[in-house]
Amino acid sequence: MTGRYRNAISFVFNENTCYSSMDDSLATEPFLLVSKPHRKRIHGFPLDSLAKDIASGKYYHDIAAKDVSTSALEDGFKMFFIRLFENI
């Protein structure tokens, strides 16, 4: 099965004003969810042992962290704040 994490962000300006977003630019790239779990498990992150990179077919546990970072996701969070401060 193919999946992706949808992220959300909120900025509380004051007790009456809160800005939030669940824009697609805040979501991860799609990945595979497989039935055979990786031997490595991280407490609190049960789906990580079932996640594989689509392009390489490797479990994310077997890929260096720098190789799976996504600048598009980081750009999505940056754009949230850029748009926010343009409108305040």
Image (cartoon, grey):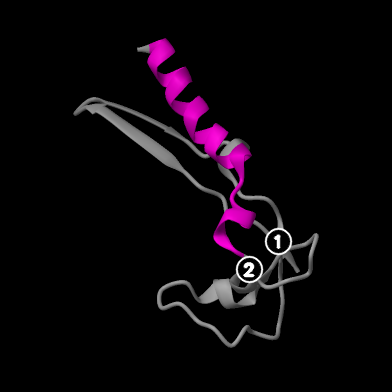
Q: Position of residue 58 (x, y in %)?
A: 73, 71
Q: Under tag 1, what secondary structure?
A: strand
Name the residue beneath numbered marker 1: 31
Q: CA distance from mark 1 to mark 2?
A: 9 Å
Residue 76, compared with residue 38, is above or below; it is: above
The three-letter code of the residue at mark 2 reads Tyr
65 in magenta:
yes
Q: Position of residue 61 (x, y in %)?
A: 59, 73
Q: Are marks 1 and 2 in contact (CB under 8 Å)?
A: yes
Residue 28 lies left or right of residue 41; in this view the side is right
Kindly identify which numbered label has been placed on residue 60.
Answer: 2
Q: Position of residue 71 (x, y in %)?
A: 60, 39
Q: Residues within 10 Å of mark 1 (few under 14, many from 20)?
A: many
Q: Main secondary structure of the magenta part?
A: helix
Residue 45 lies left or right of residue 55; in this view the side is left
Residue 44 lies left or right of residue 13; in this view the side is right
Q: Quadrant of residue 53?
A: bottom right
74 in magenta:
yes
- At x 63%, y 73%, the residue is 62
Residue 63 lies left or right of residue 55; in this view the side is left
Q: Residues within 10 Å of mark 2 (few under 14, many from 20)?
A: some
Residue 59, compared with residue 41, is above or below; it is: above
How many marks do you count on the picture? 2
Q: Nearer the viewer, mark 1 or mark 2?
A: 2
Extent of the magenta region: 64-87
Viewer-side residue, 39 vs 12: 39
Locate the N terminus by quadrant.
Answer: bottom right
Q: Under tag 2, what secondary structure?
A: helix
